[in-house]
Amino acid sequence: MKNLTIAFDLDGTLVETAPDLIRATNHTLGLIGEAPVPPADIRPSISFGGRAMIVKALNIRQVRMSEGEIDGLVQHFMTYYAENIAAESHAFPGLEAALDNLAASGARLVVCTNKREGLSRLLLEKLGLANRFAAVAGRDTFAFFKPNPAHLTGVIELAGGDPRRAVMVGDSNTDVLTARAAGVPVIGVPFGYTDVPMSELGPDAVMEHYDDLAATIERVRR
């Protein structure tokens, strides 16, 4: 896999972040006197960011707020989340060994996420994963973000890679659409944050466990 760049989404792909994101959402609801919402009800919103989670939770609780008031809640959410970003979040099973094997084979690893870059780097550092990636591009790294294909090609090039020799790994329709638009093969994981089964979103392959990563990359590159 020498000179191949593997780009990963973060939340729901590399790391199980749902517990900490959902806790931050329910903490924010508590600030306005609302009861927590069930995790399953807002888990699919994680791929769309903190604001989407707040809006979904408010809708579940039938609370109407102005855009400005929601902005204020999002700020509270972000502050709390940053302070508790890795309380329960953890790498998915088999991930670290899979990344080490890819690196040993000469692959270049990058992160392409719609999470803010600062929070992404903080999470990776807290989990001891930061030094495995040659580049990290978040929602605010460039003037564009997924599903704009330039987000994906941009982080690949930022790491010195070539989009023509790359593979994307993600958990959502946004990841599939981004990779397709960039002309990059895409592997979907079924354990992330989407309410539509990954097999129905049209990736080049679905990978059930990180033990299968190298073999799956070889398969989609043929």
Image: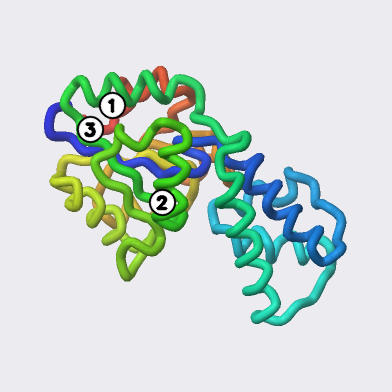
Q: Which residue is mark 3?
A: 221
Q: Residue furthest front?
A: 83
Asked whether 222 or 212 is in front, the reply is 212
Label of residue 219 in the image: 1
Picture residue at 55% right of the left edge, 51% below the top: 82
Question: Disc 3 to disc 1, how far (Cα)?
Answer: 5 Å
Picture residue at 45% right of the left edge, 35% below the top: 14
Asked whether 97 or 165 is in front, the reply is 97
Residue 87 appears left or right of 38: left
Q: Residue 218 location, x and y as percent?
A: 25, 25
Asked whether 222 or 1 is in front, the reply is 1
The N terminus - image quarter? top left
Q: Determine whether label 3 and label 1 are within 8 Å by CB.
A: yes
Q: Quadrant of residue 207?
A: top left
Asked whether 211 or 199 is in front, the reply is 211
Picture residue at 53% right of the left edge, 34% below the top: 190
Identify the element where label 2 is drawn. loop
Identify the element where label 3 is drawn. helix
Nearer to us: label 1 or label 2:
2
**Amino acid type, label 2:** Thr
Q: Which of the marked residues, 3 or 2, is nearer the chain's N terminus?
A: 2
**Amino acid type, label 1:** Arg
Q: Which residue is mark 2?
A: 113
Question: Disc 1 to disc 2, how far (Cα)?
Answer: 24 Å
Picture residue at 23% right of the left edge, 26% below the top: 103
Neighbor class of circle 2 (other Cα within 10 Å; few <14, some 14-19, many 20+) is many
Asked if residue 30 shows in the view, the reply is yes
Q: Residue 41 location, x and y as percent?
A: 74, 49
Indicate whether 34 appears above or below 215.
below
Residue 97 appears left or right of 54: left
Q: Determine whether label 1 and label 2 are within 8 Å by CB.
A: no
